[in-house]
Image (cartoon, grey):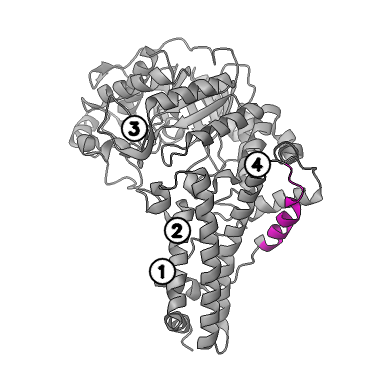
Amino acid sequence: MQSGFVLGGLAAAPRLRPMKPNAGGQHLRGLMVDAGRVPEPLSYYRRVIEFCAEWEFNALQFRLADDQGCAIRFSSAPDLLFHENAFAPEQLGELAHYARSRGVELIPELESFGHTGYITRSAAYAHLLDADPRLSSEFTGVIPIHPETLPLFKKLYSEVSAHFPSAFLHGGCDEVNWGGSELSRRELETKPRHEIWAAYLNSLNQIAEGLGKQFIVWGDYVLHKEPRILNRLNKNIVVMDWDYSETNPAKLSEVLSKVRSNGSRGIGAPALINYKWGPRAGSEQLANIEAFAEAYRAKDDGGSLGVMLTNWVPSRYIQNSIWDGFAYAATAFKEGSKAARNSGFQRFVEKHYGARWNNDWDAAFRLTYASAPGIEHASTAGTVPLHVPFSSDEQLSAVLEDRSLRSNRFAELRRLLTRLEAQVQKNLEDFQALELSIEYMGHLYWRETIVVELAARKPSTRDDAEQVIKNVAERDQGLAQALSKDWDEGRFAHSAAKLKPLYGFEPKDQVVFQFERAADYSASLASHPSRFFDLVTASNPE
């Protein structure tokens, strides 16, 4: 039974009959851009829209905010924490209309429960923070029952709705840490957690519906961690299920069946770049895309609204290096997983690069995805471990202590790409961005291997050490310059994500910033090779 108590001055909305899936009955097939963490220039977003139109994606989910800041400068709440490169609402309104003119619906997403540091890290709204010290410190949350919370979101939703003509408004609400404030603790003494949660989402939905929008929420808690929330939700709320490890379409279909049986509607949300990966996603993400495509695409029962490819944290990857993954998803979402496996990359090569498909192209894409480094505890067995380039004595010592020599799978791949570059007839800069990402990943393994091999020499001399570190420093400097140049050509040159550590980010989340730190470190050691020699010999006392 749905909760009906009054939350923050707004009554939880009564259940209404489900709306039709979409204005024209068309299922969503789309991408997501993470402007909330790292805003990118409008010219790039227009290019993504053009890509969507070309590959028959009909939606682009636009994340407006996260813990790091807000990418839209709200006039209704000017004291929020804004990104330096945040956009005026009118600019994003123009982008939304441009997208619509290309047959692409720009769906705004504004975090409304978790991922709300853009609110609570601002001095004006710090009192709305509701972190529970017993839960993960990685996540944030606003106080759902604070009398200021819902009125604030009513202002924000109203301003977003005025500039985004989409039928949908995504409220986020995943990865929430709440319950630590005095207000929430008192409320939890009288009501169960899932009841407060459902009432809050229903109140947000009431605001969205009042603005003529269909409300979407992420499904991690609603479907998995706090499943008792689901049957208390307004049936019009759309649940977007994300699970970036599942590769079995039958299991995803079971989740969709639960949504459908509840009288609700769902959207599937696989991922390309996500928390498990560095600059490139591995083969298991292709299987994740395929599984969601099979579970959610082209369902005619009204339970599924479609499938959207999420793609997270732009500073994790080189901007124009991952179009192939988008194209693979487009094929899977439109024609199914078999079509994607059989011809997804071939279509991309022929359409995007204007090249003729052959065995070298096939080998290059197979090796690219098979070689992608991932976080060891979150990826399948056999995945190359993802390392951050050493940029301190402590990190170098850890590499030397480990002493494990890892095979560098990227040397062969770079040779393949070098041969293939001559065949590229279109979008050469995108192909070169792919090459740069492979060069970067191969370089990380090379620089670790060369210092481990030095430490293993019996004996190693000061001259050996000086030659090695000068070689590392020289190559580091060249790659750092290439990465910086690529960033500046496609992103904001003075973006905080390039220049400094960002709140809530791990080192792996900022490729360019972290590698520039690594290049500075190797240059300092090259200037004082005796210190490098001492670090190497200290790791090998015998």
Asked if disc 2 and disc 4 are in contact, CB closer than 8 Å, the reply is: no
- Of the numbered discs 2 and 4, the one sitting upstream in the chain is 4
Q: Earlier in the sequence, mark 3 or mark 4?
A: 3
Percent of width and height locating residue 16 = 42, 10
* Residue pictured at 50% horizontal, 20% vertical: 97
Tag shown at residue 113:
3
How far apart are labels 1 and 2 at the CA level? 11 Å
Label 3, label 2: how far apart the Cα atoms are: 30 Å
Q: Amino acid at mark 2?
A: Gln
Q: Which residues are magenta?
A: 411-425
**Label 1 SS:** loop
| Displayed quadrant of residue 76 | top left
Label 1 packing within 10 angstroms: few (<14), some (14-19), many (20+): some
Q: Could you tell me which secondary element the residue under label 3 belongs to?
A: loop
Spatial separation of the CA atoms under disc 2 and disc 4: 25 Å
Disc marking residue 392:
1
Q: Is residue 490 above or below residue 507?
A: above
Magenta-span inclusion, residue 131: no
User: What crowding class fits label 2: few (fewer than 14 Cα within 10 Å), some (14-19), or many (20 or more)?
Assistant: many
| Magenta stretch: includes residue 416 | yes
Give me the C-alpha separation between circle 3 and circle 4.
Answer: 33 Å
Query: In x, y percent, where is residue 316?
Result: 50, 49
Comparing labels 3 and 2, the label whose residue is closer to the camera = 2
* In contact (CB < 8 Å): disc 1 and disc 2: no
Tell me the residue that label 2 is attached to. 514
- Residue 344 picture location, percent across and down: 72, 38
Quarter of the N terminus within the rendering: top left
Where residue 248 appears, x then y in whole percent?
62, 38
Position of 35 compared to 143: left or right?
A: right
Contact (Cβ within 8 Å) of mark 4 with mark 1: no
Secondary structure type for disc 2: helix
Visible residue check, residue 287: no
